[in-house]
Amino acid sequence: MHQFSPDAFTLIELLIVVAIISILSSIAVPNFLEAQTRAKVSRVRADMAAMTTALEVYAIDHNNYPHRRNPNWQGGAYAPLLSTKMDDLHVLTTPLAYMTRVPQDIFDLKVPSPLNLIDYFDPEQTNVLASQTQGKEDAGVKLWLLLSVGPDGYIGVSQTGNPGGYPSQAPAVAFSIIQEYDPNNGTISSGNVYRLQGNASFAQAIIGK
């Protein structure tokens, strides 16, 4: 006859322990993911601050900001070509090192390295973006723009307002609804991390409010 040790756990006790561990995990994992996302957002903002310094020093030396356009850029083509990103932004690192490297966008997992950089719109591009968003020929907004896809991995949003903008959506659709990432809307919610020259907001500079 088998005798059970008085020190052994009963099945009920084991089930209680498993339930407690499950409850703690359900609390800890979301908090960890939120903390991880907040840390990444902070890093992106710090990288944008470094790019801001580099852009302003470059402008002092050249009396202009770097161009970030399509090779055949014409009024309506405000979406930068991914394939030219490194070519357009290399002026910040060579021949003069205004910064040691152009920071990667740690949220941009859809684009292979080295093209997954924080995106940059030159002032003319931002003006076209603002103009088309407002349905005007010239919105008069000529500020450079730094843009990270944010935790959802897209620029802008889909036509329904859900995550899923550019590049899966056409630029004219996705770029018409650019909003700032707000962690209060969820850890991985729609919206972009951005920085406009002079710390302007999209409401002030793009939407015109």
Image (spheres, rainbow, N blue to C red):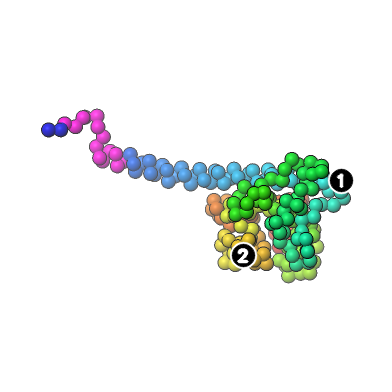
Range of magenta residues: 3-16
Secondary structure state at the residue bearing disc 2: loop
Q: Secondary structure at mark 1?
A: helix
Q: Nearer the viewer, residue 104 or 11?
A: 104
Mark 2–mark 1 distance (CA, rounded to whole Å): 38 Å
- The answer to whether any part of residue 74 appears in the image is yes
Residue nearer the viewer, 205 or 94: 94
Residue 101 horizontal/vertical position (percent): 72, 43
Q: Nearer the viewer, residue 127 or 122?
A: 122
Is 15 in the magenta? yes
Q: Is residue 200 visible?
A: no
Q: Amino acid at mark 2?
A: Gln
Q: Where's residue 190, x and y in %?
A: 58, 57
The percent position of residue 17, horizontal first and vertical second, equals 33, 39
Identity of the amino acid at label 1? Asp
Please name the residue shown 58% across and 61% down the image. Answer: 164
Point out which mark residue 145 bears: none
Q: Are marks 2 and 1 in contact (CB under 8 Å)?
A: no
Mark 2 lies on residue: 169
Give neighbour class at mark 2: few <14, some 14-19, many 20+ (Cα, 10 Å): some
Residue under the image location 59 percent in, 51 percent down: 109
Q: Is residue 94 magenta?
A: no
The quarter in which the C terminus is drawn is bottom right
Instruction: Name the quadrant containing residue 50.
Output: top right
> Is residue 11 placed above or below 124 in the rendered structure?
above
Residue 62 in the image: above or below residue 177: above
Q: Which label sits on residue 61?
A: 1
From the viewer's perspective, is 110 left or right of 75?
left
Q: How many marks?
A: 2
Instruction: Name the residue: 41% across, 42% down.
Output: 24
